[in-house]
Image (tube, rainbow, N blue to C red):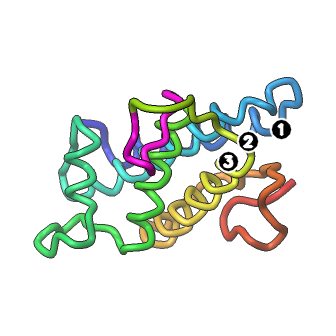
Amino acid sequence: MATFDEHIKQAQHNLHFLSSINDNTSVQNCIDWQVTVCFYTALHLVNAHLATFSLQYRSHTDAKHALNPQRAASPSKLPEDEYAAYISLQMLSRRSRYLVNEKDGQIGAGQAAYTYDKHLAKAIRHLDRLAQYFQNRYKLSLPIVLMRCAGIKQGELHYLMLR
């Protein structure tokens, strides 16, 4: 089982990678990859949190149950807004990886669901919320991440910063 510190180290690594691909003008249009990296950064923050309870899950479904704020008996539950941010990031990542829109419940039907600037803006907002929460809860030292995103306004983010 990976430790809290190992998951945090991987999250930090992912944050550096996110900043570099966001800044690299030759790959800046790879919005799908930026959304995916946002999710996997959050995944490692969540897994670090779960590790503090000696929990490690092999499936996203099991992790969601452990984090769900509606499960009163779960010691590892997240606050509602942070849980919603994590679940939304997971859906955005699935959209960017598999071209599906899970929101409409029609995963196998219709056209491919591509990822656009508006989806990256949502992913950045969700990651910002989670990074701020875990940084405050565990007194983490996460790297400052500078991002470019047309859908985000100056002053809107708390942890991530606009270039």
Q: Are marks 2 and 1 in contact (CB under 8 Å)?
A: yes
**Residue 10 visible to an observer of this rendering:** no
> Which of the two marks, 3 or 2, is nearer to us in this view?
3
Q: Nearer the viewer, residue 94 or 108?
A: 108
> Which of the two marks, 1 or 3, is nearer to us in this view?
3
Q: Position of residue 84 (x, y in %)?
A: 42, 64
Residue at (48% x, 34% y) in the render = 100
- Find disc 3 in the rendering and name its residue: 120
**Residue 19 circle label:** 2
Spatial separation of the CA atoms under disc 1 and disc 3 = 14 Å
Locate the N terminus and report the quarter of the image it occupies. Answer: top left
Q: Earlier in the sequence, mark 3 or mark 2?
A: 2
**Residue 23 circle label:** 1
| Residue 159 belongs to magenta span | no
Question: Left or right: where does residue 80 sit relative to residue 150?
Answer: left
Mark 3 element type: helix
